[in-house]
Image (cartoon, grey):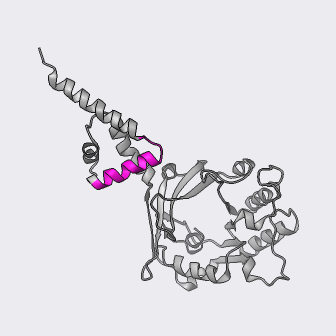
Amino acid sequence: MALAVAGGVKVMGWRAEAPRPVLYVDGEMDRGDLVERLDLLRKTTHPPLAVGDLGRLHFLARDCHSPEVEFPDLGDTDAGHRIVLEAAQATSAALVILDNLSTLATIEDENSASAVRGPMALVQKLRQMGCTPLVVHHSDKGGRNYRGSSNIGTTFSHIVGLTPSEGAEPGCMDVTMQWSKNRNGPAFAQAPMRVRLVSDDAAPRWEAGESESHQAAQPARAIQSRRFANLVEAGESLGLKKSRAYELRATMIGEGLMDRREIDQCFSDARELASEGEGSQDF
């Protein structure tokens, strides 16, 4: 996102309207990892960004400062906020990314509304300056929601969750993107999306499309219609190969869309209805 906005380019089907300055505040990444990641990801945009195109992307990164340099603590409503606000003003940043809340703010208890008041106040200050703030934060143990006080969520107009995709390869960036809050946002954000980074050295690229869960909803509805006697028939009605139909059945069960008993019962009902239809006569 930072690269797309700074370069005014397209990524995963989304295009920045025009190149705008971006301030990226990073609290944990190693300097070498930052450089390596930048070099990889700049090649995944459309068109790919040259090194010279990165001038609008500015970093305030902990690992790039010597120990005596003061680094912002976003829980501090004075000194820490001042450093970020001055950096945003100096770079004329339109987008400020804070990555991530746990490493940038000293918070005694994330579940306490008062404890997260400091960093959320900074978010409001950035808005008042005309910046768009984006905060990266970890999920809870269940992986379905962000960690900490519900007051965090009330601060933002959009909340996007990333969870590992089912069947993702170890070490591969392969996640399901789900918008749990989308105030006045685009319609495409209603459906979960699977996003995968293919790290081909020659031409690394993003692959994005409907999530497995969203795709599994179609055969689930076909099965529930009780018009098909078995999985192969239901899959064929949607243009699915047999192997793909079985893959999506596994997703249905794993995501809780249907369990095996419900699936078998629907097929049994379909066969019974078909049998009754064959035995009827017209008068």
Residue 179, image x and y in percent? 56, 52
* Residue 16 position within the rendered picture, expressed as x and y whole percent measured from the top left: 54, 66
Q: Residue at x 57, y 85 (%)?
A: 52
Exactly how many numbered labels are in the figure? 0
Above-or-below relation of 20 to 242: below
Q: Give the farthest residue toward the front.
A: 261
- Farthest residue in the left direction? 283
- For the residue pair 209 and 255, the one nearer the viewer reads as 255
In which quadrant is the C terminus drawn?
top left
Query: Horizontal placement of 238 versus 165: left or right?
Result: left
In magenta segment, residue 238: no
The location of residue 270, given as percent across then percent down, is 27, 32
Quarter containing the N terminus: bottom right
**Range drawn in magenta:** 243-259
Regarding residue 21, the answer to whether it shows in the image is: yes
The answer to whether one can see residue 225 in this image is no
Q: Pinpoint residue 227: horizontal percent, then vertical percent.
A: 27, 34
| The image quarter in which residue 82 lies | bottom right
Left or right of residue 19: residue 11: left
Name the chief secondary structure element in magenta.
helix
Q: Residue furthest right?
A: 78
53 versus 260 height, above or below: below
- State whether residue 185 is above or below residue 82: above
Q: Is residue 227 above or below residue 9?
A: above
**Which residue occupies the foreground of this view, 76 or 81?**
76
Taking the spot 69% from the left edge, 50% from the top edge, the residue there is: 153
